[in-house]
Amino acid sequence: MAAWLTPRRVRQWREYLTGYLMVAPAVLLIFVFGIFPVGFALFVSLHKWRLKRGDIIGLTNYTNAIGPLTYLLVFGLGVGLLVFAFVRTRHAVKENKEGGLRFLVLNVPGILLAGVALTFIRWTVLLLPNVLDIADKIRGVEKTRDLFMQLLQEAFTTETVLAARTTMFWFILAAFLAIAVTLYFWRTPKTLQLEFEFAVNWFLIGVGVILLVYVYGEMMTAYNTAVQTGEDPGFLPQLISIASGLILLFIGWKLWHRAEDQPSNLMFLLRLGAAMVFVVGGWIMIGELPVIVAAGDPDLWVGLRATLFYALGTIPFQLGISIFLAVLLFQNLRGSQMFRVMYFMPYVTPVVASAAVFRQLFSNRLQAPVNAGMRLLGLDPLQWLWEPKGIFQLAALKLGVTNFPEWAAGPSLALVVIMTFSIWVFVGYDTVIYMAGLGNIPRELGEAAEVDGASRWQVFRHITFPLLSPTTYFLTLISVIGTFKAFNHIWVMRLDAALGTTDTFSVVIFTEFFEKLRYGYASAMAFILFAIILALTFVNNKVQGSRVFYG
Amino acid sequence: MAKKSSASSTGVSRPSWLSTGHIFTYVVLCIGAVIAIFPFFWMISTSLMSLGEAQGTRLIPSAVHLENYANAWKEARFSLYMWNSVRITFITLAGELVVSILAAYAFARIKFPGRDVLFALLLSTLMIPAMVTIIPNFLTVTWLGRIGPIKWINNWPALTVPFMGNIFSIFLLRQFFIQIPDELFDSAQIDGAGHLRFLWSIVLPLSKAPLMVIIVLSFIGTWNALAWPLLVTNSPDWRPVSVGLYSFIDEAGQMINLMMAGAFIVIIPVLVLYFFTQKQFTESISRSGLKG
């Protein structure tokens, strides 16, 4: 008994306890308001939830938002999880060549641990509605501690929750036993580590399989209902076509990528040719996409389009202007500190206030500053933030073209004003970051080039700009993600007159939630936003590897 | 070498800022500065105009109407909103500092099982867009208010508690705490000081710079917040100044001079903070990579 209770052990346990106690408040807060909400949002998004919780409707919110594309995406997610688990397993096999039997046996506690995680999730999902209902039950009656505890106890002890808890307990017990047995036979720290690695793999596999089975069922149900009600069930072949198109594109891309390594020119050309065929074929098959997309929510697509315009219309300009300003400021001229302070001011200003100023600057009144300036220059005043028409369409109208195609109209003038505001705000920030990047470039490089007779432009083009690419990459990533998150200034500057052309993705979500009170639907949209941001980060990381030069 | 010679050669002939390249640079920089500053100039100038002038095309007021500020202050109920924002900032900051300092210290200097995994898990929440968490958090906060002894909606808890656990502040402090040499801790331990004592009397006095960064960022965050306060307040009792200004923009309608006075009132505290802590301010914001 006393053998393991050495003073050293006691001190160590006390140290652990201190650590846990010190992080406890932070972990609790971040868990409740940062991690749990992700699961909760998923839970909400699977419900019909208009202000109050309604029935579970599965993927309906998602199919309402992006049409049958949902099935393809969930399917892809499931396959992705399986592939990821496979890659991880292969990696583990490569790392641990020695233990054949041990390696296999350690999967047993791994499976059981994954089972614990899955049954725990199931238990929480069953418990959550009961706990949420407490708030309704407590309404109107006097709140007391006893009543709350009683209701809480009831929530935990309904039949389904109890059953789920029992399964979970069995899994926990079995996992404990399995871990104890394996630790008894192979008493190394590696054993436990491997078991947890396997647990993660099996958890991924479990979730992947559940997703695949579920989405297959949902898709078939949708297909059968469509057949029965006499609607067009064409979405299924379309989805298959798109999926195979994507696979073809992927193969084409791989071939293209490897073509450079080919030893002979003929092989190189053959590879390139094959890649072209695959890409074109894939592209044609993806051609079904617009049909599928049309089944979704037009608001969402308008929002996505506005976000795309916003990203394309702000990021290049913003980065271009700020790299220019940063290079100029970096010469450390007299007064450059003062310029820096001034450029940074828009970024510091509270957004609601500066957006309010821009709302007046770009007002549709004839006397508003920008319109007054336009008239001074002999131009016609414009509607600015009140203008839902696209800028190209407006330009065409000016030239007398009245039947300008809708799809080529471009971002609305109102959105362009908001984009201008965004550039105005973020140039200061980007400039400061670029100056920090310039500070990391050794001066000798530029000076050596100048000695060799390079012009200032050549120095910038061939030395400064490539060496700044990590900064450019960082700023691009931040700005792209920022575009999808953009909210405050758009919320202040959006006007009914602009007919929603200014609403980017985040704003569309917030209106669904805040104004239309469709919590379930808004959560589904928010999840789609999350997926897009994750995908962009992923792609960005891939691109970073090949394109960014870290001097 | 090259630098030295160029400096001496320009120094002999004429002042360096007079060369053609520099004149071009100054012209460009000035154009940029005018664009950056003009909205502020217009805001201040309009806020001093009479209503008629403000609606016209004048750039400079013919007479200074300082009473616009008094009127805007009264009509937009800024005394209440400012006080609310100050209270919210103060409560958030107090909670955030205690929580972050403790957690950052433990993550930096105490070894316990699962520490790094836990930290990585918390850091990964930075990836989650606010629109995903805003809906469930609203439901959670409503629920907590209904079952608990104090209400959350329209009260300080909903506006402050969710922001007290800020992983970014923890991250910032942890990076700083890690750099504190181990010898300091060892000698403190020999003198009989425990973790808390060491944290309080040695680590914190050394950490003024990162703490300042957190204070600045938290202040800006509260001052900028719009979506969340809009959601969780439905009366002026606890509404912060950003929401106050947002509703004032609609109420003021055509009274542009009052609106601009209101906007300037909201900007002043931030600008004052900016000009006084300018270096730290710029550094903290640019290091954070995120705002509001």
Image (cartoon, coloured by chain):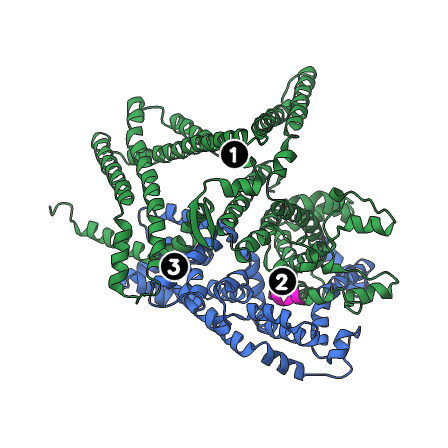
Circles 1 and 2, Cβ within 8 Å, touching? The answer is no
Asked whether B185 or A2 is in front, the reply is A2
Spot occupied by residue B288 in the image (x, y as percentages of width and height): 53, 56
| Residue in the picture at 41% in, 63% down | B161
Q: Chain of mark 1?
A: A
- Chain letter, colour green: A
Q: Secondary structure at mark 2?
A: helix
Question: Amino acid type of disc 2?
Answer: Val
Per the model, the C-alpha gap separating discs 1 and 2 is 36 Å
Give the residue pinned by disc 1. A71
Q: Residues within 10 Å of mark 1 (few under 14, many from 20)?
A: many
Q: Residues within 10 Å of mark 2 (few under 14, many from 20)?
A: many
Boundaries of the magenta span = A350-356
Q: Chain of mark 3?
A: B
Q: Chain of mark 2?
A: A
Circles 1 and 3, Cβ within 8 Å, touching? The answer is no
Q: Is residue A352 magenta?
A: yes
Residue lying at the far front in this picture: please name it.
Answer: A229
Question: Amino acid type of disc 3?
Answer: Trp
> The C terminus of chain A appears in which quarter of the rendering?
top right
| Chain B shade | blue
Give the residue pinned by disc 3. B143
Say if labels 1 and 2 share a chain. Answer: yes
Asked whether A246 or B12 is in front, the reply is A246
Q: Nearer the viewer, mark 1 or mark 2?
A: 1
| Residue in the picture at 72% in, 75% down | B46
